[in-house]
């Protein structure tokens, strides 16, 4: 491959879960089913929020963007994961690998910013209800969403650019199910010290700061909830906030353990297990935690289904009458 960084590797071989050969078929079925659930759940959220006027609030606006993001985030990773399970390894060109890395970092960073914004939105709704409608007016929501996406776009460029400038002289086997930063740096035959430090600092800036902002928002929420006189009201709010915080902790915790740590590499098997949590598990849990456990959303879902079923029924009757 003709390149300024003198790379001789033109493609990589993703090994996937080759240490679990006897489980390949079962893993394929499980991940395919999870992928179907993620796609279906997030598409349902987008459709319901778009069609129901009562859900046109800041919280559901952010949720709709999170669902749209999750569709692309998982589609960046899971289809290639499924391909590695079918063929017991999957070849990917150098440029396609760098492209996958960019979109993974882009969507992952954008999700961090959106989760922090959603936590801030819940903080304002619970702790400053009288000022909420002013502080979260539509133009502010639009700006917060735009900043999240644009910051994510910028965050993805630096790691992918620095990885693309490294020398890859062989071997070309990536012991992972996607083009992630640690296994790619391990394959490089040039010095990766500067790249590691830049990615480490960038990870701290994105992951740790967003996680701290999210935790601070929930600390204020919990302190406000403790002042609610009704025991049932406290339990309901704690249940909702606890679920949100659990998913957020899984996502940030696994991400931080992967990218904000000393340069000593973890074993490939541990890397894969950790990666499954932030690429597959949390995208599966998000639609359930943020919407399907929500009473307002479930009511809106029923209304949208009745409305669409009614329209479909009327059209069927019209077609039968014409015939």
Image: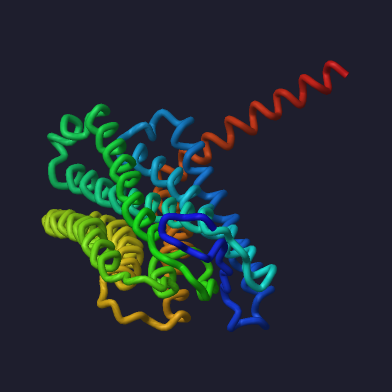
Q: In what quadrant of the picture does the N terminus appear?
A: bottom right
Q: What is the quadrant of the C terminus in the image?
A: top right
Whole-percent x and y of residue 138? 27, 28
Whether residue 57 sits left or right of residue 11 in the image: it is left
Q: Vertically, is 228 above or below 247?
A: above
Closer-to-camera residue (77/183): 183
Q: Indicate the colouring scheme.
A: rainbow
Residue drawn at point x = 32 percent, y = 58 percent: 244
Snapshot quadrant of residue 25: bottom right
Determine the residue positioned at 53% across, 43% down. 43
Residue at image position (57%, 58%) is: 93
Q: Is residue 68 left or right of residue 90?
A: left
- Inspect this view and state whether residue 159 appears: yes
- Relative to the observer, which residue lies in front, 68 or 162? 162
Give coordinates of residue 21: x percent, y percent.
Answer: 65, 81
Instruction: Report the residue at 12% width, 58% height from top.
Output: 223
Q: Is residue 163 left or right of residue 129?
A: right
Looking at the image, can residue 230 be seen? no
In the rendered image, which quarter is residue 183 located in?
bottom left
Q: Nearer the viewer, residue 277 or 95?
A: 95
Residue placed farthest to the right in the image? 323
Q: How many marks?
A: 0
């Amino acid at each position: 491959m003709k390149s300024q960084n003198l790379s001789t590797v033109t493609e990589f071989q993703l090994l996937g879960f080759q240490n679990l050969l006897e489980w390949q078929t079962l893993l394929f079925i499980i991940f395919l089913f999870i992928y179907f659930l993620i796609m279906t759940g997030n598409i349902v959220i987008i459709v319901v929020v778009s069609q129901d006027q009562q859900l046109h609030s800041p919280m559901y606006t952010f949720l709709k963007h999170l669902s749209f993001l999750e569709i692309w985030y998982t589609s960046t990773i899971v289809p290639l994961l499924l391909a590695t399970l079918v063929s017991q390894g999957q070849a990917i060109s150098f440029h396609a690998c760098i492209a996958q890395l960019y979109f993974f970092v882009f969507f992952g960073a954008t999700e961090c910013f959106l989760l922090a914004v959603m936590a801030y939105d819940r903080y304002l709704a619970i702790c400053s209800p009288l000022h909420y409608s002013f502080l979260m007016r539509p133009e502010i929501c639009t700006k917060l969403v735009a900043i999240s996406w644009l910051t994510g776009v910028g965050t993805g460029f630096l790691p992918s650019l620095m990885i693309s400038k490294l020398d890859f002289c062989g071997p070309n086997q990536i012991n992972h199910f996607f083009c992630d930063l640690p296994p790619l740096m391990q394959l490089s035959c040039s010095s990766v010290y500067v790249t590691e430090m830049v990615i480490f600092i960038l990870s701290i800036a994105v992951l740790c700061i967003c996680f701290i902002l999210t935790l601070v928002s929930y600390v204020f929420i919990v302190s406000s909830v403790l002042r609610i006189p009704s025991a049932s009201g406290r339990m309901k709010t704690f249940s909702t906030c606890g679920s949100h915080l659990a998913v957020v902790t899984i996502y940030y915790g696994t991400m931080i353990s992967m990218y904000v740590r000393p340069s000593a590499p973890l074993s490939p098997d541990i890397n894969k297990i950790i990666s499954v949590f932030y690429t597959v598990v949390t995208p599966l849990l998000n639609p359930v935690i943020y919407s399907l456990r929500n009473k307002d959303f479930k009511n809106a879902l029923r209304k949208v289904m009745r409305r669409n079923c009614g329209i479909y029924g009327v059209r069927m009757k019209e077609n039968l009458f014409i015939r």
